[in-house]
Image (spheres, rainbow, N blue to C red):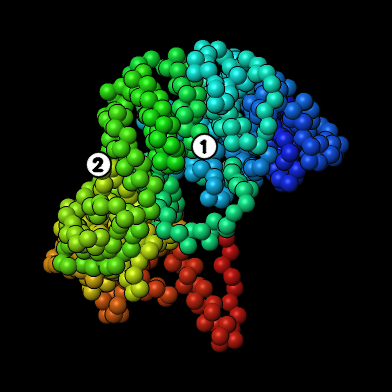
Amino acid sequence: MDAERDGAVDVSIVVAAYDCRAHLDDCLTALLVQRVSTEIIVVDDGSRDGTRRLLELYATHHPRVITVIRQRHTGLRGRARNVGLAAATGRYVFFCDPADRLGVEALRRMVAMGDRNGSDIVLGKVVRHGRAVPRPPAALYRENAERVALRGSAVYDDLSCAKLFRRSLLERHGIRFDEALRLDADMDTGADTGADMDADAGGDVGTGSAADADTDAASDLVFSVHAYCHAQVISVVADHDCYHRLSHAAGPDPDAAEAEHDDLDADDSDSDDSDSDGQDSGNVESGRQGPMAGPDPLTWLRVIRTPIALMARHIPPGPLRDHLLLRHFRLDVFAQLGAPFLAAGEAEREKIAHEVAGICADWLTRGVRDRLDGADRARAGSLHDLDRLVRLARVETARLRHRLTGVEWQGGRLTISGRVSLGGLDGRPGVVLRERTSLEERRPPVTRVADVFSAVIEAASLPAGVWDVYAAVECEGARRLARLGRRRATGVCVPGPRFADGVVVVPFLTRAHGHLTLDVGGHVVRVPGSVRLTRSQWVGRRLRVAGRVHVGKTPGAAAVRHLIWRERSSGLERRVAARATGPQTFTAETGRLRPGTWDAHLELDVGGPPARFPVKVGRPEALERPLRWWHGPVRWTARPYATAVNRRLSLAVRAATPLTLLRRSLRRLRALRVGLGLAMPRLRRH
């Protein structure tokens, strides 16, 4: 769709700009190439660095798309966005920061999702660039979601405004950015939480300060919370990189920092058949990433009451409210008891603990407390004990060092060895297995000596699924986790699969980061196996097939279920039962098939999705001769053969009528006469 065509506007893109000349060009270029009808409303908050001249240039060249609104400098991004929102005419509104970029076709995909489902909010996959950028919640972007509920999902974890909002939702409920919300040191803790966020804030603030950035973050929080509370349909586009959040702060290259520092590995989720790496939503177990945590935890704790109270006004007590409150406690409240608490002075620590205790007294229900992780439960119970809070903060901020030193099979047991330590703190090392979909955890028995551990996993005891392996350290009632495997000793190799008790376990290293994972049942990696034909025999008009089967290097006849014949051109399948005749041998008998070319596959139950292996022909003598028979006037032919390339067993079935046979005979006779130099009249069709 041409962005400059006449007609209704699909998306109004609001950009609040201030002294962003260096990055604005890339941002606007990405907006202009979106393949939906857009209007781009840029509100210039009194820029002084050339932003104004660049905007004039863009507005001149794209007068029907770009509108520039200039205002006196306020230092409030929320006020600029409210001005842009008031001028918007599109069916949807998208807020884009001038330092970030929209992905190619992002709006087309998000609008299509919104139109298909009548969505009030559409979240597009967020990609971070730079270590300074907060991690988006990985659980949110694992797969597309046409309709996702607030309860039980991770959508509420993302309270940024880089989303597609239906404008009628915003207008109907008066949803605006809170211009009265200020993160000043002397701020009034009794801020109004009942208004629809349309109050005006007086005075100027120096944009670019830490307080301004946190004010913007808090304003985003209030806006998104209000929108979520009224949204009837929420959708997620996860299969496309929609929004690129960039860090333009000076500093070392993030890739170099990754190699140089022993930071915590991220949690894994799925990306392709053999590898998937994402990020944990953020807690002490994996290195808390409080996305809105600012440098002044005390003022942040005071202002966070505003979105919490706003949410509570719209959501009645119960499981949904507890689910939403859990997000605020995990990422907004208890996050201030980590690194920010450790960096504060003793007097300020007491104030922070007092502020957290007040929020807990108001909002920490039994339902929320029961869902806290061990570290946050320890914090909630230690708000009167500053020394314990300091120790817990040290556990959270200490560097977690880990190294994989060995992985090997010992019969049906997998032994994982390594080292893990927590920044000089006295903790208990261990191993945690976490199933990627259900998040179920298993803790195998571990032998420990100082920071050296050895875990023994009974392969047959694990339920089917994809189990990510974590190094763990428990200290002060808190637990730190890191994906194990990326850092490993020289020469460490992952062993092959093991098939036992009808279940295959495939250890593998993820492709992107080299994290150790166990695939129980063959869900995301191909199960290695082989099927060899030993004999084929006609029993009447039925073809009996016998062969040998291995899963990895282990006899696998106990897992055979079906012999599947798949017609090559139509994809039609014929399934017949197969049975084991020994530890590695099987047999199956196939009846009449329709005309076509049928390829043979053996289906096994290895504890997960059915695994299929082509039946290969090792020796030509294993193939039975063709079988011919008449059914009325039709002659049938069934010929087993091995394909030329991979020697796979196939069965060619042909049905010939008398006319077909006559024509075939005439063609042969004609070819013979041509070879002898004789002429022959053609058979005419009447």
* Mark seen at residue 477: 2
Report the front residue among 356 and 624.
Answer: 356
In the rendered image, the quadrant that contains the N terminus is: top right
Q: Secondary structure at mark 2?
A: loop
Count residues near mark 1 (Cα–Cα under 10 Å), then give few for <14, some for 14-19, many for 20+.
Answer: some
Which numbered tag is attached to residue 295?
1
Residue 358, position in %: x, y?
37, 21
Quarter of the figure with residue 368: top left
Position of 34 with respect to 525 (left or right) is right
- Which element is circle 1 on? loop
Residue 301: % across, % down: 46, 27
Q: Is residue 555 above or below residue 443?
A: below
The x, y position of residue 433, in whole percent, is: 27, 51
Q: Earlier in the sequence, mark 1 or mark 2?
A: 1
Q: State the residue in front, 526 or 348.
A: 348
- Among the 4 quarters of the image, the one containing residue 89: top right
Q: Quadrant of the C terminus?
A: bottom right
Indicate the amino acid at tag 2. Answer: Gly
Q: Taking 665 as reference, is 233 above or below it?
A: above
Q: Is residue 671 or residue 186 the one in the foreground? A: 186
Q: 96 or 623: which is nearer to us?
A: 96
Q: Residue at x 39, y 47 (%)?
A: 397
Extreme-bottom residue of the structure: 676
